[in-house]
Image (cartoon, rainbow, N blue to C red):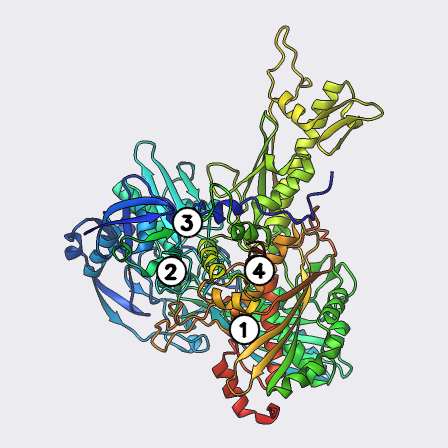
Amino acid sequence: MASISLVINGKKISKDVSDNTLLSDFLRDNLSLTGTHVGCDTSQCGACVIHLNGSSVKSCTALVVDCNGSEITTIEGLANNGKMHPLQEAFKKHHGLQCGFCTPGMVMSAADLLQKNKNPSEHEIRDWLEGNICRCTGYQGIVEAVKDAASKM
Amino acid sequence: MTSLIGSKIERKEDKRFLTGKGRYTADINLVNQAYAYFVRSPHARAKITKVDNSKAMKAPGVIDIFTGDCITKDKIGGLIAGWKIVSQDGKDMKVPPHPALAKDSVNYVGDQIAVVVAETLEQAKNAAELVSVSYKVKKAVVKTSDAMNSEAIHEGIDQNLCFDWLLGDKGKTDEALSKADKIVKIDLVNNRLIPNAMEPRASIGDYNSSSEQLTLYTTNQNPHLTRLVMSAFNAVHPEHKFRVVAPDVGGGFGSKIYPYAEDVVIAYASKKIERPVKWVAERSESFLSDCHGRDHISHAEIGLTNDGKMTALKVETIANLGSYASLFATVTPTYLYGPLILGLYDIPVASCNVKAVFTNTAPVDAYRGAGRPEATFLIERIVTEAAKSIGMDQAEFRKKNFISKFPHQQCLVHNIDSGDYSAHLNKALEISDYKNFENRRAQSAKKGKLRGIGFSSYIEACGIAPSAVVMSIGAGVGLWESAEVRFNATGNVSVFTGAHSHGQGHETTFAQIVGDKLGVPMENIDIIHGDTDKGPFGMGTYGSRSLAVGGTAIAKACDKIVEKGKKVSAHMLEGKPEDIDFKNGEFILKNSNKKKTIGEIAFACYLPGQYGEVKSPLPPGVEPGLKETAFYDPINFSFPAGTHICEVEVDQETGETKVEKYTAVDDFGTIINPMIVEGQVYGGLAQGIGQALYENGQYDDSGQLTTASYMDYTMPRADNFPRFKLEYTTTPATSNPLGAKGCGEAGAIASPPAVMNAVIDAIGTDVSMPATAEKVWKALKENSSKKVAA
């Protein structure tokens, strides 16, 4: 067990956790932040992507104890005072989601792309999102959404 | 008021998914919940000689362990094959018992043997390691092609043959083939796929020993049917005390239409320990134990006249059912496959023989398209080879053989009500710029790349399943749909549907129908599904049925609401019901300025009845309340159709294939929400292109699944696709009042042959699905005639 403290979606959290607790399980089971999903066991699907100190990370591959002192944003914390992030709006407008399971990871991953590249090309978007699997949309609505959001940010 | 039907409207369900507030089964945690972990077979085929859980029972946190012996003792029934097929010799299909926990033998890697229930998941997993199972390992039967010549897996099922089914007249087909000017033959493999809905399966059983009520939360496309099967066949719990909830479900694609062994066992375990029990599959468990899809090998022969008319088609298919016959497994390669081998062509005589075999692999069941992708791949591959064999243009050959007059009775089963096949082909030719293809091929050649073009004109039978049609060819039941439209006194509307949305956007599409029908704003309409305690019995979502069947049931319930509203408003407006017009949410008395809104009528329906001085607004004899139910059994299938044209570029140095252009022109009849329809097509295309180029469920000779993770099974990703171009033509269905034909499976049905025809056109030699870089490179090496100099 270890005592950790971190800032999640702007709130300070202090907890005792066991050494082998994954960040994804910690968010889901200890904090009920179930928007972060787990879709595989090999860090391939990307449904669990969150932001760790501002960068996208697959939370199923991080141990919570290693995140001590860091700042984390999950899908629940992306909207600002109830106003959806431009990416969330764009995903809605361009039908960038269907069943919604990959969506939190997809949006968090795309949000990191737009932090790093303000105006990505279609090729750059598709290349960046290679680590997020969606089985429903064929990715076309997602790519449209990311482009549109970039133009509005 | 502008019509909601036909409008691009953003989805009502999106906000919760986009803000992390979706509620999937794995997100649910109940007070006092225990955790389950399954012990699964590491062998493809073995006799179980002993299961010893004595060590495991003593492990920390273990509450109980259940095995095949336990469920046998408690008379829990096995899993069922839902559709009886009769072989051509008149005998019923042969189906082995499929216990929810294996007792005497295991028949595929991943077969469930025991479940450990513990206080934490970690404790359950650790204890599962201590369950000692002794096996006598036998030689596994793995390959589809070997099954009939191998030792019988199941006692009493010779040749591992479930059934030997024949559709059509084989004698007349052979005769017509013998008279043909030319016969074209083809051998095809339809590769095994693993559905891979992004949400892994999960179940939570919650037994309340006080009320004796059992609730099962589960990842399912079909909660009412799941409850029925688990009550009637698995004997888990009586139906009236059993609630099945399928909350937000993260994709299904057919793999979640029926209860799995884990659902049965988790519900049972919860009853046994009188506590909630939760199980969530790991992805590797999904790969091993979710039902797989496709897995056919086929031989087909088609007869031609010298001028390019098809005269006869003969098909012989071996369909791999895997280790057991899953619930929809036997209907998929028969009723959903055989009738569709004719495609959208006028072929006067045909026969289709399907031999379904058991192997020591995961059970195979419906996967997006279910039977229709296999039929379409077959007909569109052989049609392409037929046109080539007589040197005819692919488009011209198709047009010459298309059905052109409707309704058209095909020689096998289907009576096709409407369509215009040349219209979608012509539109696809135009959008894909077919006439300049050879220029593009030459441009690619300059870069050292091989370019090819592939056509796929398809038809599907959707709106599953009209009783009259499926029962005429031997099915025991049809599949209707239900709806209840409940007007609340304050004027908003709760709509209950037996369909289930797991990505399809029903909360929006169905609200558009209700909004138009009743003149109520969409924000005042709630579509409720996925809970057997709420709505009437329904048949769930698969087979592109939700709109054509479920949407129609909703529309019919709305019609009944309007009928009642006419009676009530006539009474209130002092006219006759036949003199009331209903438009845009208002009941208007003809030739007057008197009217009532539907909200006023709804309120009036909930006012008290007549008593003394209190005057009821309801006419005498009319019951209070405003709630109507409709059950709809369609009169026929609906027949979406279309033409897809694919262009690929193959890198001759690496064998890598890239889809460069993809054009889809589809006829889905009436479209309610074009944005949602586009999304369905895009998603289907990704799965179909995935089948053609990347995905393959592969077992080694010992029956180990060698593609059991995302490291090994190639899921299509964002950088695998070009921008798809979609267009529509429209001929409304006549089999349902909405005119809807269904759109959920078209992309996955049409695209595999479009892609493969393009790849084969590019490299000039046959290659099987998936056309991976390795296979294409090898095929090119063996046939260098197509190579171009860079």
Label 3 vs 2, first from the N-terminus: 3
Name the residue beneath numbered marker 4: A147
> Is label 1 in a helix, a strand or a loop?
helix
Q: For mark 3, does the 10 Å Cα neighbourhood hold few (<14), some (14 to 19), or many (20 or more) residues?
A: many
Label 4: chain letter: A
> Is label 2 in a helix, a strand or a loop?
strand
Evaluate whether label 1 is on the same chain as label 4: no
Residue B58 in the image: state x and y as whole percent: 14, 52
Label 3 vs 4, first from the N-terminus: 3
Which residue sits at x=26%, y=58%? Answer: A66
Label 3: chain letter: A
Residue B681 in the image: state x and y as whole percent: 61, 60
Q: Could you say which disc has been placed on residue A35 in the image?
A: 3
Q: Can residue B473 be seen?
A: no
Q: Where is the C terminus of chain B found, in terms of image quarters?
A: bottom right
Label 2: chain letter: A
Name the residue beneath numbered marker 2: A57
Q: CA distance from mark 2 to mark 1?
A: 32 Å
Q: CA distance from mark 3 to mark 1?
A: 33 Å
Amino acid type shown at disc 4: Lys
Q: CA distance from mark 3 to mark 4?
A: 24 Å
Amino acid type shown at disc 1: Ala
Evaluate whether label 2 is on the same chain as label 1: no
Label 1: chain letter: B
Indicate the quadrant where residue B567 lies. Answer: top right
Work out whether A153 lies above or below B712: above
Residue B537 in the image: state x and y as whole percent: 52, 41
Q: Could you say which disc has been placed on residue A73 in the image?
A: none
Q: CA distance from mark 1 to mark 4?
A: 29 Å
Along the viewing direction, whichever of B530 and B22 lies nearer the viewer: B22
B438 lies left or right of A83: right
